[in-house]
Amino acid sequence: MNTTTMGKEASLDGLEFDGDTVLCRVCGDKASGFHYGVHACEGCKGFFRRSIQQKIQYRPCLKNQQCNIMRVNRNRCQYCRLKKCIAVGMSRDGT
């Protein structure tokens, strides 16, 4: 079991948590469950679902495609949010 302290958050075998709550792998909000292959909040679950079902092509990021996606700013750059969803392992086939 690997535990790494990152400020208030810690990582335990790939799970992000803040004491007793599992956090969304995309934005760090409270995860509502295991969605599309990763622990995700309702917001990121819905965003990813709409993005893949509607095959949305978001406008390219204006900040060099390196936006830091967090709960407070997750709606600012859809391009980077979808990129992070994919980077943390969300997929249509995830269960």
Image (spheres, rainbow, N blue to C red):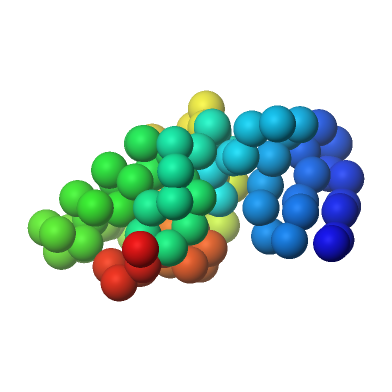
Q: Is residue 1 at all visible to an observer of this figure?
A: yes
Q: Nearer the viewer, residue 81 or 29?
A: 29
The image shows residue 28, relative to residue 13, as above or below, that is above
Work out which residue is located at the far left of the displayed protein and give it: 54
Picture residue at 70% right of the left edge, 31% below the top: 20
The image shows residue 81, relative to residue 72, as above or below, that is below
Q: Position of residue 7 (x, y in %)?
A: 85, 36
Report which quarter residue 94 is drawn in.
bottom left
Work out which residue is located at the far top of the displayed protein and give it: 72
Q: Is residue 87 left or right of residue 54?
A: right
Q: Is residue 68 left or right of residue 92?
A: right
Looking at the image, how many numbered discs can be counted on the residues?
A: 0
Work out which residue is located at the far bottom of the displayed protein and give it: 93
Q: Nearer the viewer, residue 91 or 58?
A: 91
Picture residue at 68% right of the left edge, 60% below the top: 14
Q: Is residue 65 at all visible to an observer of this figure?
A: no
Q: Is residue 54 left or right of residue 31?
A: left
Q: Position of residue 70 (x, y in %)?
A: 56, 38
Q: Quadrant of the C terminus?
A: bottom left
Report which quarter residue 43 is drawn in.
top left
Q: Nearer the viewer, residue 95 or 71?
A: 95
Q: Position of residue 32 (x, y in %)?
A: 44, 36
Q: Nearer the viewer, residue 76 or 89?
A: 89
Q: Quadrant of the N terminus?
A: bottom right
Picture residue at 56% right of the left edge, 57% below the top: 66
Report which quarter residue 17 is drawn in.
top right
Q: Is residue 17 left or right of residue 29?
A: right
Picture residue at 79% right of the left edge, 44% below the top: 10
